[in-house]
Structures are given as structure tokens and as C-alpha cells.
Amino acid sequence: MTDSTPDNSAEPTKVMPPAPAPAPAQPSPKFTAGKATPPPTPAPEPTGQFMTEAPRRGGGFALFVAVVAVLLAIVASGVAVYAAKKASDATDKLDKTLAAAGLRPEPSAAAQSPAPASSPTSGGQGTVSPAPSASAGDPLDPKAVFGEHYTNKELMPTASGNTAYIDLDTPKIQHDRSGSEVGLNSSYSSNTPSLSFQDGVQVALAPSDSAGAADCLDALRTSLLNINTTIAASRDTKLCILSSVDQAKADGVPVRLTLLYVESLDNDKVTLRLTSWEQH
């Protein structure tokens, strides 16, 4: 009798591991004209850095530099003008301060050099050139130069028993004889007062009431009146009067030439019009 029971002692069944997955299929190379075309090159992976294009230096930059240079030049010019103005203001302020204190700055060499003297014109007014001098030489010399001292000054002295003295340098009326050139005296025998003159004063009749310095100097040279002459102060009297040279030197003032014109006479009051020049 045959035993049909299976034999458990047989060799056990082997379990096979799973097969690996097949590799991905590679694209087949393409053939062109019998040659294989290589596959496309893959793009590089980004690295996180970005490339920037350097700025271009062209005409715009050059224009910017030029504009800046012009602006700087304008600013520099403005600063220079402002500095010059401040310096001028400071100089003026200093001069005023010195003048208020009775001081004067040293004059420049150009200011110390006297301007060339010129001869009096035919009109007779003369020309102001160098400063007046107390030692300018003979005032009646034809080369003497006289400049204007004052013009058309009016005085109204009164001769009523006392002599009214007239200082032609200022001009002014005074009671003291000292420093005067002319005296106005009342007359007991006439209603017209008379004019007398101090020592050293030279007098001549003027050719007109508008005579100039040259006209008066010529009259003094050609028709000088005598010393101690007394002249009636009647209306329209015209005199050329030269101050005393010796007195001018003693006082340290220039010699002065004066045209005296009697405009009117009212009893003892006389109206005089005076124009004066001084020797340079």
C-alpha cells in the first residue's frame, strides 16, 4: 500500500528578490547625413549672482562737470566782490573814525604831488591848482596864480558915528581894527560914508563890477592908488583890493585879492558885494 502523504522533508521553496527597475531610456542619437548629432548642452544652473553693466561715461557726464565748474567760478567771483566791498567799507569807517578823533591818515604820494599850475584865463577867474601858500612870491608878478576864495558874498555894514571894520578874508564885519583890511567911516560933512584901508593894503579902481582876478591884478599894476587914500562909499563904487603881503606872511595865510562893489547906500548903511581870490 502506497503512502500518499506528502513528504514534508523536501527542500524549502526559495523566494527571489524583486528585479531592479529598468534604466530610463536614453534618446537615440539622431543621424544626419551619416553622422550622429550630440545631445543639446544643458543650461548652467543659476549661482545667485547677477552681472551688472558698468555705467557708460559719455557726453552727459562731461556736461555735468562743465556746469559744476561754471557754478564754482560764479560763487568765487561773488565772494571776491563781497570781500572787496567789506574792505572798502572798513577803510571808509576807519577814515571817519580818524577824522572824528582829529587824526588824519598819511596822504599818498600822488596826493602829495601838487598839480601843475596854470595861468589865469582872460576871464580873470584864475585856476585852483596847488594849495594856497603864504610864500608864493610877488602877487603882482604876471606869472602869479590866483584861485577862487569865495564869490558874491554880501555885507551890510553901518557907519553911525563909529568905524565899522571889514575883514575881507572871512569876510565879516567887526568892531576891532585887528585883522581887517577896510574901514567904513561916517562923515560929518557928507551923508556918504567913506572907505579907508589898513597899512600895506593896495587898492585900485576896478574896470567893472564883474572884473576877474586877472583884471584886478592888471589894474593894481597899472593904476595903483596912493597910500592912505580915502574913497567915498557911493553907490556903484568898484575897487580891487590886495591884502598886505607882510601881514599875510605873519599870519601864515595866502595873499588875497578882493573885488569890492557898493551895490546900494541907505543913509549910513552900505550894501557891499564881495568876490575874492587867493594866491597859490
Image (cartoon, rainbow, N blue to C red):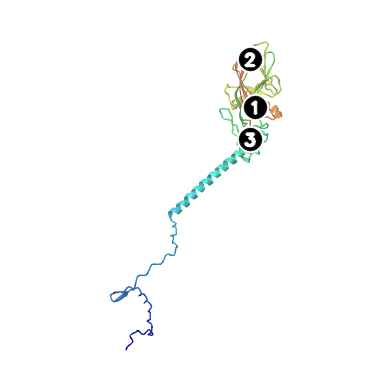
Whichever of callouts 3 and 1 sits on the residue coming sooner in the sequence is 3
The disc label shown at residue 256, or none = 1
Do the residues bearing badges 3 and 1 touch, measured as CB atoms within 8 Å?
no
| Residue 87 spot, x, y in % from top left | 60, 41
Residue 104 placement: quadrant = top right
Element carrying mark 2:
strand
Residue wearing tag 2? 269
Q: Quadrant of the C terminus?
A: top right
- Mark found first going from the N terminus, 3 or 2: 3
- Please name the residue that numbered disc 3 is placed on: 96
Q: What residue type is labelled 3?
A: Lys
- Give the vertical position of 245 relative to 229 (above or below): below
- The residue most toward the top is 189
Q: Residue at x 50, y 47 (%)?
A: 71
- Residue 220's place in the image compared with 17, above or below, is above
Q: How far across and down, in percent of the image, does residue 260 sit?
A: 62, 21
User: Please, what secondary structure does the residue beneath circle 3 have?
Assistant: helix
Q: Nearer the viewer, mark 2 or mark 1?
A: 2
The residues tagged by marks 3 and 2 sit, at their Cα atoms, a distance apart of 45 Å
